[in-house]
Each structure stands twice: as structure tokens, then as C-alpha cells.
Amino acid sequence: MTVQDLDPSAAAGAVVDDVLADLDGSHRGVVVDSPPGAGKSTLVVRAAGHLAAAGERLMIVAQTNEQVDDLIERIAAEHPALTVGRLSAAGYLPPDRVLACPSVKVAQKADDLADRAVVIATAAKWATLSDGSWPWAIVDEAYQMRSDMLLRIAGRFERALFVGDPGQLDPFSSVEVERWAGLTWDPMRSAVAVLLAHNPELPVHRLPVSWRLPASAAPVVSRAFYPFTGFRSGTGPGDRRLEYGAGGMGTSYDHALDEAARSGWALYELPARHALRTDAEAVQATAALAVRVLQRGPVAHSERGSQPVRADRIAIGAAHRDQVAAIRAALGPHGTGITVDTANRLQGREYDVTVVLHPLSGRRDATAFHLESGRLCVLTSRHRHACLVVARAGIPELLDAHPSAEPVRLGVPVRFPDGWEANQAILAHLAQHRVAAHA
Amino acid sequence: MSALAALARLEAVDARRAVPIATVRHCHLADAPLVLIPLRLAGEAAAPLAVMLGTDRADPTLLAVPQPRNRDLRFAFAAELAKVVLEHVEASRGAAEELPPAKDGTERVRYTEAPQVIVPNTGGVAFLRLLGRSTRFRSTEGPHAVEPSVPALGRWATWFAERHDRPGSSLLLAATEALRLHWATGQSALEDGNLAALLGWIDPPDGLDGPAAAARAEDPVRCPPAGPATDPTFDNEVLAPAVAAYDATDGDPRAEERVRAALAGQLTPTWDLVWHAMDLLRALPEGASVPRRWERDRDAFTLFHQTFAEGVPQARRDTAVAAARRLHALERAQDAYDAQRAFDDPLVMAEHRLNGQAFGGVVTEADPTRLDESGKRPKLRPRVRVATEDPVRLDAGTAVCSAERPALKGRIVEYGTGGVLVELTGGLGRKLVPEPGTVPAPGDRVCFTSLTDASFGPARFPEREDTPWTHGGPPAEYVPSDADAAEEWS
């Protein structure tokens, strides 16, 4: 019997067992690739407990303070007996959820946490240390970390577990980085890419099941962004349902909402037009759709039972910060509590319903930034129930007019699918769920 | 392209003339920069054909390779070029000024001046980079020995090209880039790469407007390309027969003169254009932060110059540690440069105000002596409210500083219909009452921004010999060998 034939829990459990077995082996590093919502954090928490139980002192590296605090909360809940140290910068104020954990101690100097079994900090904080060494490290969101950051912290650990999602956004820089293209230690590549380029013998595991994405989304996201490795949803076609308490008024917003509830996807299409980045109509439509979802009293039925979808379970994603600011302003008092953020900052987060302003909507050109497959992947894989995409018509034509023209460089692994291909795949799917905006 | 840059381009199209996008000059211009216009042989990556260079507009020096495929002639050319460039480096370093000793007690000096090189376009920068790459590893003894000045030229050319990568550095300027920093034209960025067309938009000759002058620049007879690539018709009809005649006559001086005259005709128009570009830039007042950035350039020059004798050629490729260090330095320089330009220039700041990363307006309320007594000791925390019509996109708690006086720091308390309430936290003096004039008074025009040029302490990197296992471990040491000298030149 192969892994594919197992039921989702058993398949995922088998992979986790393999990972834990590799931690007990002699490898210097272990890599785990995780598609969206595949239980990455759960794995980190389990591995932390596993290593701590073996008596190893452990350091954990996350990328942002919020990720660190999330991990602390979960580790403290799973392993209350484990002593946890939270290494932080001077300006950091621990949130209540961290202060509420009795086993956690917060300090700015590593020496003050010498007695802790597990020490957690952001990569930037770890990079300020010039000595000290831990036998084991867990690097979370390792594909978001630039390899130059790994270079700065790698002296702190002997062996490490790297966990992350290869389909998310690549690291970026504000300066010219061509100079290093093709080098195995290119500082712009992700930590995992550089690690594996120098240590090709390290075991790489893949979590096979997305517990977040519904059956309507997992195959679409898997085909578009993970065509070679693939994953499936942990739930079946009928397991998740979205219902509205209030009937619609028959507007095109309501049609889009109904389509999203029925199929898990909706493309709310505005007439074709070239627009500024903060396209007023598209911003208005994005905000209005999110508010309308809230107004119609949605209830989510899933394996976790039936729960009303409140503002904190709805997110709006966009490509640029000025778009985010414009959408926030357009939300008004009815949208209070709805999360609005850029793709970068939505990474690793989960909601019931998401509304996405398509990165290519209204654009005249398709730049590498807007084509990046990771950006679209993050935006279309945050939801447990439904994803509504707002876009102006004409994106397929725009893509056809802008084939990928990035120079091919020696020694740089070819990325496939590229953003162009991934965008086409998602658009082809969304075209089946198109609702035209009222004129 | 930002909305403001797009608007400037539209205005330029409408006015048929370039539109200024800066009120001050954001690059340093030395009194006597070395203007250097390289040409390379068509079809070769970096085979030098000719260079016109000099610090005196009326007296350019022309160096040419009469048969660019002859390796010996190329090295003879490199030696001649090295002489001029190295003389320029030595002539423009000024005196060594003593600085206060560093924290660890080591003596510090800085030359009062530094050499500046100006090339017509980014292609010129790329050519210098390749020229540096092809000459810096040459050996001065053994097989294929060259003049000692040739590898020295290679190291200097590489150094200049690498400084060019650094945002805000003025040691090596490309005229097109420097102009584009200060004017927007009605043509595409690609077309702006043509110096003649760009200057046509900015300062069209009498009787012409921008588009007409730019169209005229497309005629390779009237405006030969600014290099390093030459016009193919010139190559076929003029250069090739002249080089063939040189070969046929076995290097006859008259045949050599024919090649030189042909090349001079190609280079002289660009020579005049580069000096014209500098006239236009010089007419702008210098930005307030430009001397500070030039000081960093002089620091870098001093370090390179003083360690030149014991140094080795720059590595072919950055090691893992060197790459990470350089990227970090470049990113820091970029942030500081962006902020400094905005502080210096209200037109640049306007872009950030439009983005919501800055806001300007009139102070409506001020509480200059407000104390925050929540902590153990009272702290001086004056508050000012700024009425603004800008689309502010800064959250409460964001640290901001004043564009007029970046030392004045604060943070956003709230943003509402009455304007933005800013709590000032720094730049007020050491006492519990602010120094006179530090807190803006009602009626003052102010501008606050979240941009900052504050340099955090440099990041910590492992030493090269401590390169971790994740990055392949420590790299091998560089050992010069005869293989370096046998390397092909393009």
C-alpha cells in the first residue's frame, strides 16, 4: 500500500514519523516542505517536544515576532513542562498570550536563558549573538529566510530541522542582486535552497495533506503551484459548507457570494480598464464584497462543527501596501475587524473566507513582482471555505502580451511553474466561477 | 513607476520638453572629473577599440587600438589607459586629513578629495567592469607578462565599477543615470539610455523641441552612439577598411592615423554631450546630504588607496561571507540614500507624501513642555498636531522624523479628522524643557516621514574561515598562478 492510498491522517502521520526518525539519525540537517496549511506548526511543536524529550537543548528560529509568539503559545500549550525562553530585542513588549504562559521567560540576553530547554527568537535576533551554541535548531518558515541570514546564524547550532513552504514568496531585496546569480551561496536564494545546494544528501520530506484548504481548493492550488510534488485536502468534497443566514438582494456582489458558497471560488470581474495601483473601483468592490459577506451572516460548517464566520475569520489580501491602505479606508465601520494585508504579511495565516484583489488587475504590464507565483499562491491559499478574487477583465490578454522574459542565468535552477504559468492556471480555473460586475 | 513619476512623464510629453523631478543635485560633481568614453569592438565582449578621456574639456586624449584583435596591441592600450587613469587617481586625492582616532584607538585619515570618473551611460560602467575583470589578474612576469600598470588599472577599474553599484556613490557616474535622477522625459526608460536623445529632451537646441531633438539623435551620422557599442554602418564602411589597411601596410603610422581619425569622429560628439550634461547638473544647487555621501566615497577611496600595495586583485566571485556582507552594505546604503534624497528635496519627498509614507502641513496645536510621568522618571514628550491634506498611511505608533531636521524624532499617536498627533521623543536637548526652536510652533509648516537614514550598527557576519557547513564551509585561499595570465581576453 502506498502513501497515496492511506487516509489523509495516516498519510500525514507517516511522514511526521519519518521526520522524527530522521531527527534521531545522524543527518546534520533535515528539510520538511509543507504546502499551505499542512500542519507545519504542529510539526514544529512536535519536533520541539521530541528533541527536548531526548534531552537536547534546542533553539528555534522564526522570521517575525508574531510567528515567534504563535509558536510559544502552542509549545506552552502542548508541552507545559518544557521550559521556554523567549529571546527578544529591547523594544519588544510581550503580548498577553505570551505572559500568560507560566513556563516562558522573556529576556534580551541569551545568558539569562541558559537554563531553558528551548530558546525561541526571530532570525534577526539570533543574528546578533556572537557566541553560544545549541546542539539542535528548528528553523521555521525557512523558505522565507534569505540565505545570508542563515549564514549569520548557522554558527549557533550543530544540527537543524528546516521547515517551510516552498510555494510562498521568495526573499527579495531593494538593490541589484544580479551579481550573485548562479552562485550556490547566492545571498538572495532561500536558506533551504543554499543548504541543499551544499548538502545534497540531506533528507527532504513533504507533508502530503493540506488541512486548511477545502476539497474545492487543494487540487487547484496543488496543480498551479506544486505540480510535481502535489498534495491533497484533508477533507472531502461535502465536508465543508458555507451558508448565509440572510438571503441576497440579487446584486452582482450577492451573485459572487453565492457562487463562492457553492463552489469555493468566485471571480468578481470588473470591466477592462488600465488603472492606477489604487484603482478606486476595484478597491471599492473588494471592500464591499468583504462587508457583504459579513452582513449576510455566514455560517461555516466543517469537521470542527458549525460556527458563525465573524470579521476576524475574514481577510482581504492585496499585492501592495498602498492598496491595503486604500481598502482599509474603504471598509468603513461595517468592516471593523476584517484583516487587510499584503501577501507578504498574510503568509502563514488562515481564515474562513478571503477576498483577494488580483495583483494584475488593471495593470498595463506584468512585471516580475506581479507575476511571482508565490504572491498569488499566498493570496489564493489562506481560506478554509471560500476565496473571492476581484479583478478587471483582460488579465489573460495581459499575460499573453507579457511572456516571461527574464534572462536565463547559468547555474540558477529553473523555477517551474513560473509565475506566468501559475497565473494562467489559476485564471483558467477562476473563469468557471466568473460573475460580472453590474454595469 | 510611481504615480508622480508617471505624471511628470505625461507633462513632459505635453510640454514636448523634459520636466524637472528634483530641485537640488543629488550627486557630487568634482571640480575636475575624468570623463571617459570607451568603445569596444563589435561582436566582442570587452575588446577595447578606443577611449576618449581627460579632465579638460578642450583637451581630450584619444587612445585607440588600430587592430583590436591583436592581443599585444590590446595590452599596450591597457598600459596607456592605465597611465592616464592612475595619474588621475594620484592627482585628485588631495591631502590626507587626520580624523579623531577610532574607538579602538587606531589612527584614521581621509583624503580631502577623491577621483571621480564620468562615463556616458551604463554601458560604459559595464565596460569598465569587464575591462577590470580582464586585466586585474594579469601577471607582470612569466608567460604573457604585462606592464605592472595593467593589473593596477584592472583593480582600479573593478573598484570604480563596484562603487557604482553602491546607491548614492558618486565616484563613477553614468551621465544618463545622473540626468534621469533630475529630469523626466516623454520617452521610455530604454530611450532615455541614449544620451543624445535624453539631452535633446532636457535642453533641446534652438528651434527644436524635445521629440524633434530626440528624433535627430537617432541618426548615427549626426549623433554617433555613445558607446561602448559602435554603429554597424560605421563598422562596415569606415572602421573595417581602415583596420584592413593597417594590417595590409604592416602597421604603417599613416594607416594607424586613419583608424584614430575615424574613431575620433565617432567619439567627439559624445565627448561634448557628456560635458554638456555636466553643465546642466552643475547648474543645480547641491543637495544638503551630498557632501556627507561624498565623505563616505572619500573614506572608501582612502581605504582602497592606502591598502592597494599589499592587496590582491578582487576575487572573481564573492565568497559566501563576502556576498552576504556586500548585500547588507548595499541595502543599508540604499535606505540611507532614499531617505537623504527625500530630506534634501521637497519634490522627492512629494512622492513619499503621495504614498502615505510622509505628510506635510501646518502645526495647529503644540504642547512643547509636556512630560510623560508614567515611568520611574519623567520624560520630555512634547506633542504637536499637524493639519494635513496628505493621504497618511502611517499607523499609530510608527516612528517618524522631521524632514527639515531628521534629528527631531517622534511617533504617531493618532490620525483623525483634526490631523496627525505626533509625540516628539528625540532631538529636543537633554533637559526636561526643550531647547529653544526644537519643537515646531503653531503656524509652522512641517513635514514628518517614516523614512530614516539612521544607520543601525553594522550586522555581524562570521569570518571567512568560519563559513558554516550550510554554505559549503570555508572557501579555498586565492593563489595567483600562470593560469591567470593565460586566460582569454574576451
Image: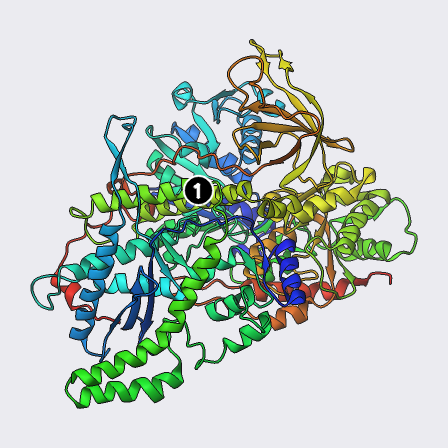
Q: Nearer the viewer, residue B77 or B268?
A: B268
Query: Which residue corresponds to the image point at 50% horizontal and 41% vertical from the top-left?
Result: B340
Query: Which residue corresponds to the image point at 50% horizontal and 75% vertical from the top-left?
Result: B217
Residue B78 is left or right of residue A314, and the answer is left
Residue B229 is left or right of residue A68, and the answer is left
Position above or below: A168 against B228:
above
Q: Nearer the viewer, residue B349 or B421?
A: B349
Image quadrant of residue A151?
top left
Query: Which residue corresponds to the image point at 82% horizontal and 63% vertical from the top-left?
Result: A436
Position above or below: B125 against A165:
below
Q: Label 1, on which residue?
A: B332
Residue A300 in the image: state x and y as whole percent.
Answer: 78, 44
Residue most toward the top? Answer: B376
Residue B428 in the image: state x and y as whole percent.
Answer: 55, 21
Colour scheme of the picture: rainbow
Image quadrant of residue A28?
top left
Q: Amino acid at mark 1?
A: Arg
Residue B446 in the image: state x and y as whole percent.
Answer: 64, 33
Classify mark 1: helix, strand or loop.
helix
Q: Chain of mark 1?
A: B
Q: Nearer the viewer, residue A227 or B295?
A: B295
Q: Nearer the viewer, residue B330 or A439?
A: B330
Residue B101 in the image: state x and y as whole percent.
Answer: 27, 28
Residue A209 is left or right of residue A299, and the answer is left
Residue A320 is left or right of residue B179, and the answer is right
